[in-house]
Amino acid sequence: KAGVTQTPRYLIKTRGQQVTLSCSPISGHRSVSWYQQTPGQGLQFLFEYFSETQRNKGNFPGRFSGRQFSNSRSEMNVSTLELGDSALYLCASSLASGGANVLTFGAGSRLTVL
Amino acid sequence: QKEVEQNSGPLSVPEGAIASLNCTYSDRGSQSFFWYRQYSGKSPELIMSIYSNGDKEDGRFTAQLNKASQYVSLLIRDSQPSDSATYLCAVNKGTGNQFYFGTGTSLTVIP
């Protein structure tokens, strides 16, 4: 059974550019969540999508956005990149949306903003 | 105040000893609690989940939850060098899959 697949794994951008990250969840999983991981702040919740609808959104500026497609694949977009956006972006999938569900993480997309 | 707090460590224990990792959370309404392990350069993977007060054992791992004290702990018995990793405590308040993570405790098991 394939795991959570994130692409690209590594990318380098410059300030002001935008970036799109992709996540394919485990087959049958309908919930996809996105997290930002930095050494200082740890893992911080960005947003969750379930059945193509955003269920929750974390405390990030509007430059961070996402969407989910009918096949449960998800993308997140960061516009007008800032140096502070350099981080590991982790996608996690889950069968359903609810507090008791286990998250399975992908390998992450490491973004460096120069 | 952070939602979830952990001692960042580093915590070092000799091989075969018990490692004790602790976590506190701020929202008394939090409903489910998880421990994830993250090896350097890898993504987090689930070790244990616990939902009610008391202990839950799985092999060498025991999770303990005390909702009155808003405290979650993870005990690792017979620690092995392969247990060396960062351990993340995560809490869910029952709002979908929005989890609050601590910044992690770095554990080193010395052979």
Image (spheres, grey):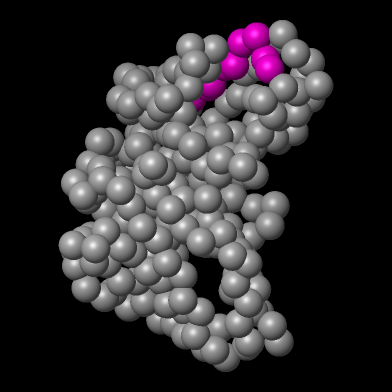
Tell me where residue A110 sits by quadrant: top right
Residue A7 position (above or below residue B45): above
Residue B109 position (above or below residue B96): below
Magenta stretch containing residue A54, yes or no?
Answer: no
Nearer to the camera, A90 or A86 = A86
Taking the image as shown, residue A103 lies to the left or right of residue A79, namely: left
Residue drawn at (29%, 39%) of the image: A96
Residue drawn at (21%, 73%) of the image: B54
Image quadrant containing the C terminus of chain A: top right
Residue drawn at (56%, 59%) of the image: B8
x and y, in percent, of residue A50 in the image: 33, 28
x and y, in percent, of residue A25 in the image: 47, 37
Nearer to the camera, A5 or B20 = B20
Can residue B83 be seen in the rendering of this structure? Answer: yes
Nearer to the camera, B47 or B77 = B77
Residue A31 position (above or below residue A100): above
Residue extending furthest toward the front: B1
Can residue A101 be seen in the rendering of this structure? Answer: no
Tell me the magenta residue range: A74-82
Residue drawn at (63%, 87%) of the image: B14
